[in-house]
Image (cartoon, grey):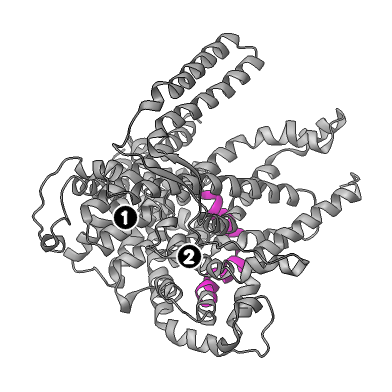
Amino acid sequence: MRRLTRDRLTAILMLLPSLVVLGIFVYGFIGQTAYVSLTNWGRDPAQALALRPELAFVGFENYTRLFSGFLETRFRQDLINLFFFTVFFLVGTLGLGLLLAILLDQNVTGEGFFRTIFLFPFALSFIVTGTVWRWMLQPRGGVNLLPTYVGLPAGEFEWLTTRQQVWRFDWSQIPAMTSLLVAAVLLLLAWRAWRGGRHLRAAVMGGLAALLAAWSFTLGQSVALLPFPETRGFNLALIGIILAAVWQMSGYTMALYLASLRGIPEELREAARVDGAGEYQIYRFVVFPLLGPITLSAMIILGHISLKIFDLIFAMTGPDLATTSVPAVLMYLRAFRGNQFADGAAIAMVLLVLVATIIIPYLWISLRGEVRR
Amino acid sequence: MTRQIPWTRRALTYTLLLLATMFFLGPVYLVVVTALKDPATIRLATAWQLPETWHWQSFAIAWEAFAPKLRNSMVLAVTATTISALLGSMNGYILSKWRFRGANVVFPLMLFGMFIPYQSILIPLFIFLRDIGLYGGLGGLILTHVVYGLPITTLIFRNFYAEIPDEMLEAGKIDGAGFFGLYTRIVFPLSISGFVVVIIWQFTQIWNEFLFAVTLTRRATEPITVALAQLAGGEAVRWNLPMAGAILAALPTLIIYIILGRYFIKGLLAGSVKG
């Protein structure tokens, strides 16, 4: 049929502009950023803002400097900050979101009212949230005053300005610690496999875990990522930012969990009840296992938001405070305040790789399942 | 429900809900109270107390300072939302009803664009806008939001149109409707709630956005988020103004959320790829 083919052609032609534009604005621009990150753009102030700057190719020099430069220490602390921020942000939003969803799942009166209140911060800008929480976290006001209303002494914690750092470690220990972490995960998987009766798999995983652990305590100790010792740790000033971020985003996880909980057929719970399960056991053995997929989706969505976090920190502590900085903030500072475009591009590429490692598998799995259906 | 729930558990549930409500509304209370205080009476130690006299002038001052920025935000959000919603609707129609070979490759490649950290395209984007003369103006920012809004609007519409039975389109084809006829006569009229979801979502995202706004605009064209960040970021600032400003900046999206919350949640759930 000629008519049908012409319509098909129209369809493709109508889609083409969007595809071309996105191709350029996403992939073309990423390519350009990758190229810029391999040049010296910005090193020479005269060239920095030139319309047609003369750029020299410097290979991976910018990356080497970010990860091991003696003067360039901020980027490494930013990465550590990002790690701790992400971990606590995920734990906080998932935990609080799940708790709120379970509470609302108890046939409470005024459910709609509570739901509206728990989710409203999600409609706000991170800039608004940041401005508000900056005022909440003033050391001699806001949150620190709350204990006085129940007869306790006022809080003393200097939320956003403290320079305290805990869990300090040498940057060079990161490989050893990472392998120890992987070993722990493997051990957990081995234990589950053992319980599931797959003894061979359990033995292999256990063996690998032991090997990794052994490595991290022996050879792993002598890995030197830097020619000098460098202590890094968890900056306590981040707690305030995590608190504000959890306030803003836990309603989102609540909405996701609530939608999932409502999707669980009541017969399933009823059946468990008939079998004599208590409320706690119903959640433990019936409900929670069914929440696995949505938890994974939520972790990925929140995780990538967390890796990109920028506005909130900008509004709460400004871009210049190093204790609460993350790579996204440093990129802005370098490229758009300091005209160090090559540095900015290199930081942006690191950020992109971090996000891509969680998003690409996610897209792959979600869409592959869809095609099969 | 006839099931008996022990009163202890009910009490615990409501206590926790009450605590959570205080956690979520505490900041709102503090903001409103601070915005309504006479700046001279704002003290850290009395932050939680009600104002002695209700002082509404802060809103007038904040309004005067922020009105042009609010207008920028409004122009930006309305224009970019409209264009990206229309384009997304067309793309979604094509991707769900005119499946072509390669669509399974093209679609994920499009979607990836909504997850990338925008820092990774910001430098070339800045240069591109400067080269075509759009840097610093609202036009450049609108273009940016339209382009990077395409993946999410396309995704939501694609999932939305997947619900329209193919038979309806087949019937339309038999009646002699072509590509555009099917869209204008069958698909578009069924899209109202899809448009509501997409428009609410995009409007909220664009209104609240900060990274593009702070890097791609100049003083005169900056949206409200940039103005608020600058006002609040200054040292020795009087807190009544940032608080009044924060309320002004939050109101449009809050009103939408409160009135159209149902659609807002739909958009939020659609944001995770499977829909």
Check chain identity for marks 2 and 1: say if they share one: yes
Residue B250 is one of the magenta-drawn residues: yes
Query: Looking at the image, is B24 positioned above or below residue A217?
Result: below
Magenta stretch bounds: B247-270
Give the letter of the chain under mark 1. A
The residue singled out by tag 2 in the image is A316
Q: Nearer the viewer, residue B95 or A368?
A: A368
The residue singled out by tag 1 in the image is A331
Residue occupying the point 54% across, 87% down: B58
- Determine the residue located farthest toward the front in the rendered image: A229
Left or right position of B47 against B147: right
Left or right position of B10 against A85: right
Q: Is residue A112 visible?
A: no
Q: Looking at the picture, which amino acid does disc 2 mark?
A: Met
N-terminal of the pair, mark 2 or mark 1, is 2
- Secondary structure mostly seen in the magenta stretch: helix
Give the letter of the chain under mark 2. A
Residue occupying the point 30% across, 50% down: B120
Query: Looking at the image, is B266 positioned above or below residue B80?
Result: above
Query: Looking at the image, is B116 positioned above or below residue B236?
Result: above
Secondary structure of the residue carrying tag 1 is: helix
Residue B147 is one of the magenta-drawn residues: no
Q: Looking at the picture, which amino acid does disc 1 mark?
A: Met
Instruction: Give percent across and percent down for residue A130.
Output: 50, 65
